[in-house]
Amino acid sequence: ELWDTVTELSVGYMVLGCICQGLQTALPALGWYGILRYAYPGGVTYMPVLASYAAGVALNNFLPANIGTFVTLLMYVAIVRGATFPGILAGYVVQKIFYFVIGTLIYIYLFSQVSGSFDFQFGNERDALQNHPVLTIGIIGGAVFLIALLMRVFWRKVKELWQKAKKGAAILGDLRAYVKLVLLPQMGGYAAKVMVIIVFLAAYSIPVTFGSVMSVLGSNQLANLLSFTPGGVGVNQAFNTFALDSYTDSTTATAYSIGQQLITTAFNVGFAVILVCVVFGWSGGSKL
């Protein structure tokens, strides 16, 4: 029954979903290009950045723990002239600012839809702190001392890493450049991500509403955090099925999740292979 539901997807929906998926890769890569071009002027062009980013996206589809992202960072170190790993890592932090903000807003919205979500109780924790003040002060003091000791031992290395990291995040010092070169492409890429969800929800006749789209976005984010299986397979389906419980039956929700993941994974892998071969050449891509 599940297989029959998965294979009901029409070619038109698949093509439209793949177009949106391509934009979801190309536009964030453009944001990465803005970060790297600003940090290392003349060090790289857009197509190698796109190919490396697409490779990481493809690898994340069948490797656990988002290992593909780490591969992308290493590829950037290799292809960007003058780049260092601390600098690229700082660029990654810059690249994640938008996604952190939008992800937090989605979580706030989803929690606000559940009554009592924000009724936190701190009574037991407060009592524990009041009953053991010496132990609490000792733990805090020990933590501060340990941090100070580590900073003293590794201060020279920390300063070197900090200088390299500052270069990778240099675009944050120019708000106009950040908005134009990073934020706007990322917003476009996120809009494409939302469109992928809308297309496949419609393809499986699941109601396309603000709530259903937000539920899928939120469940995908949680599944991404717990991506212990290759590509998050199973984890994504469990979260999506739970999130869509009030919109459709579990078979259709599971079919939607599997169908979307299969099609976007196939597209991502094919897109990455083509880009790596075109940009770096078969031997160059293999060597990289």
Image (cartoon, grey):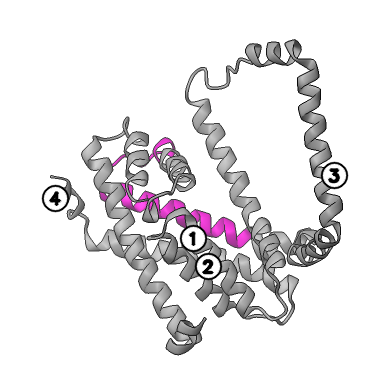
Q: Earlier in the sequence, mark 3 or mark 1?
A: 1
Looking at the rendered structure, the kind of residue marked 2 is Val
Which amino acid, mark 1? Ile
Closest to the observer, 128 or 14: 128
- Give the mark toward the camera: 3 or 4: 3
- Mark before the other along the chain sequence, 3 or 2: 2
Residue at horizontal 63 percent and vertical 71 percent from the top: 33
User: Does 182 sit left or right of 134 as displayed?
Assistant: left
Residue 40 position, x and y percent, is: 73, 75
Label 4 sits on residue = 4
Q: Residues within 10 Å of mark 2 (few under 14, many from 20)?
A: some
Residue 227 to residue 162: above or below: above
Give residue 119's position: percent from left, percent from top.
Answer: 58, 17
> Which residue bears the numbered disc 3?
148
Give x and y (percent) for residue 116. 52, 17
Q: How much space separates mark 3 and mark 2, taking CA atoms?
A: 33 Å
- Helix, strand, or loop for circle 1? helix
Pointer 4: residues within 10 angstroms few (<14), some, or many (20+)? few
Q: Which label belongs to residue 71? A: 2
From the image, tell me which residue sits under label 1.
67
Q: Identify which residue is drawn at 29% across, 41% down.
A: 206
Callout 2: helix, strand or loop? helix
Pointer 2 or 4: first along the chain: 4
- The main secondary structure of the magenta stretch is helix
The quarter of the displayed image where residue 212 is located: top left
The answer to which of marks 4 and 1 sits earlier in the sequence is 4
Magenta residues, start to end: 184-212
